[in-house]
């Protein structure tokens, strides 16, 4: 017998979990479908020997604290999802190799951050502070736009929100240059482009500022028990409120009514129906699982026009010594061969930029006593994997990546890693394509740049994918990827769908 739900959520990634938690809490009969045996998508873990590794998590921004909650903290609090948070108050340490290199650590807190940049680049403090101050002006403009239901008055925008108008359509570097920020200070701050996958000369200033400000203002946060604590907390909300989570249940088809609206999904030969379907699966994959005749031509063109975002190569290391014995004093270190983000991006396969994280610096018990873990992230695209790579050469390809970056980190940081390796695992975009099912192994959905920037996505939200009964959430949606963004979009979409199901507008 076919089953009927109010809401079906496809994919238990961060966005899907937040969406399902909201619809279940609102009293909707909710079903969350997940193809793997665990929830979380990228927010999961795997074991090698006595070590447990995070596939993707470095940290979350936009969390805040109980006394000063930000978006993510408030979402979990409103859902009554229990998480024990840990915090890191250095933004990052960044090392530029070479004769004109530097080794600089940036601090959290508005004043501390501005002062640490100014210490490295004297005379930059005012421009850095002015850049961060744009955040509140942008928020005020966005609040006004929402108040006006997306139809703000032009004169009001010009007179009261002129800074928003100046920032919204420009790149990070254009805005920083207009504020008189020295190039070295720009390059230092814009090291963070690696977290968004788009270099700062094309990255929308508003998008970058949203992330930067929250890292600076709140510091980075992570769950004490890491990704599974986050995912398990949201699953608990779903189940406590009568929702169901089916694992090992891969959706193979999206079902449609005669009028073109989504009717439900198929899991193998089982058809399941709902009033609304929320997809944490990227639109390209959804359309491939749909009857092409019912997908509006505009939707197909949009999905095909968008550029897939960046993926990563990652190296997971379990070491037989503590972080202190290894000489690791920092949680996040960006190592780069070029100062300018565009050069880092263009030379990403050579000596561009990579990130080294030691979770033990923030969560000391994240590995067995007397040990530590290191996590290397190298931003690359799926298309960067050699086209002529043969299956029998794949292991060699991964080993060469590991050897190159471990040896470079040893030399740059002045520590000895290789003799202490007890466990090692290497992932590439091929790994993420296999696990996540995303085109080219993208972990960022679509690239947020050019015509497909944050502002354009926000403005086109109601028309971009306007299939009745189908909503999207997660890293491919408006705000792009990152745990915090995915939770925020899942929260927004879940509440919106619940309101419709319960008879609201």
Image: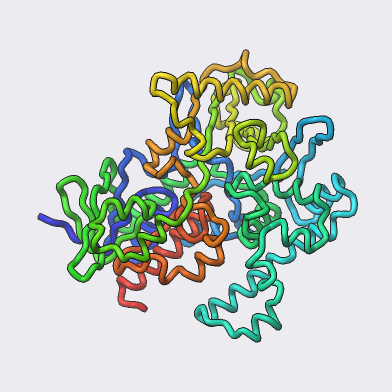
The quadrant of the image that shows the N terminus is bottom left
Q: Which residue is drawn at the image coordinates 53% and 76% (left, top)? A: 146
Note whether 115 is above or below 500 in the view shown: above
x, y (%) of residue 390? 40, 23
Name, please, the residue furthest toward the top.
419
* Front residue of this view, candidates 173 and 8: 173
Q: Is residue 87 left or right of residue 275?
A: right
Q: Nearer the viewer, residue 131 or 158?
A: 158
Q: Which of the image's four quarters has the C terminus? A: bottom left
What percent of the width, then of the height, locates residue 484? 53, 53
Q: Is residue 69 visible?
A: no
377 w.r.t. 452: above or below: above
Please name the residue shown 69% across and 45% down the image.
341
Q: Position of residue 50 (x, y in %)?
A: 48, 22
**Quarter of image, res 393:** top left
**Farthest left residue?**
1
Q: Is residue 290 left or right of residue 204?
A: left
Residue for point 23% across, 52% down? 253
**Percent of width and height locating residue 367:** 55, 27
Place residue 172 in its image quadrant.
bottom right
Q: Is residue 436 above or below residue 477?
A: above
The number of numbered discs placed on residues in the rendered structure image is: 0
Which residue lies most toward the right here?
122
Q: Residue at x 48, y 55 (%)?
A: 487
């Amino acid at each position: 017998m076919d089953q009927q739900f109010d809401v079906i959520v496809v994919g238990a990634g961060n966005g899907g979990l937040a969406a399902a938690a909201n619809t279940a809490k609102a009293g909707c009969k909710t079903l969350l479908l997940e193809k793997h045996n665990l929830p979380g998508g990228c927010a999961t873990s795997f074991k090698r020997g006595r070590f447990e590794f995070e596939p993707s998590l470095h940290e979350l921004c936009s969390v805040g604290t109980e006394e000063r909650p930000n978006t993510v903290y408030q979402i979990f609090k409103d859902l009554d999802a229990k998480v024990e948070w840990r915090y890191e108050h250095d933004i990052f340490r960044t090392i530029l190799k070479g004769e004109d290199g530097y080794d600089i650590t940036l601090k959290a807190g508005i004043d501390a951050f501005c002062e640490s940049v100014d210490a490295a680049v004297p005379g930059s403090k005012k421009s850095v502070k002015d850049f961060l101050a744009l955040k509140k002006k942008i928020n005020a403009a966005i609040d006004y736009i929402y108040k006006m239901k997306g139809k703000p008055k032009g004169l009001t925008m010009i007179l009261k929100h002129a800074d928003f108008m100046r920032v919204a359509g420009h790149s990070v570097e254009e805005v920083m240059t207009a504020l008189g920020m020295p190039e070295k200070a720009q390059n230092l701050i814009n090291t963070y482009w690696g977290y968004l996958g788009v270099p700062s000369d094309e990255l929308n200033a508003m998008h970058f500022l949203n992330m930067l400000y929250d890292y600076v203002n709140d510091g980075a946060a992570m769950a004490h028990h890491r990704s599974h604590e986050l995912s398990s907390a949201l699953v608990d909300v779903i189940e406590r409120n009568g929702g169901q989570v089916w694992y090992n249940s891969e959706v193979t088809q999206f079902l449609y009514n005669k009028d073109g609206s989504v009717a439900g999904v198929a899991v193998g030969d089982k058809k399941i129906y709902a009033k609304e379907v929320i997809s944490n699966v990227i639109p390209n994959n959804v359309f491939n699982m749909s009857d092409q005749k019912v997908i509006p031509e505009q939707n197909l063109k949009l999905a095909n026009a968008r550029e897939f975002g960046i993926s990563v190569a990652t190296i997971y290391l379990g070491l037989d010594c503590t972080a202190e014995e290894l000489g690791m004093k920092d949680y996040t270190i960006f190592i780069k061969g070029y100062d300018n983000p565009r050069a880092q991006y263009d030379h990403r396969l050579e000596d561009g930029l990579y990130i080294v994280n030691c979770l033990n610096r923030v969560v000391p018990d994240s590995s067995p006593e007397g040990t530590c873990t290191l996590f290397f992230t190298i931003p690359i695209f799926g298309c960067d994997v050699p086209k002529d790579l043969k299956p029998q050469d794949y292991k060699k390809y991964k080993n060469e990546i590991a050897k190159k970056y471990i040896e470079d980190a040893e030399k740059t940081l002045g520590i000895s890693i290789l003799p202490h390796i007890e466990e090692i695992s290497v992932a590439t975009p091929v790994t993420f394509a296999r696990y996540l099912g995303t085109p080219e192994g993208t972990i960022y959905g679509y690239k947020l740049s050019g015509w497909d920037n944050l502002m354009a996505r926000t403005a086109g939200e109601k028309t971009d994918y306007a299939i009745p009964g189908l909503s999207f959430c997660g890293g491919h949606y408006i705000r792009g990827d990152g745990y915090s963004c995915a939770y925020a979009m899942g929260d927004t979409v879940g509440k919106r769908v619940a309101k419709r199901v319960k008879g609201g507008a």
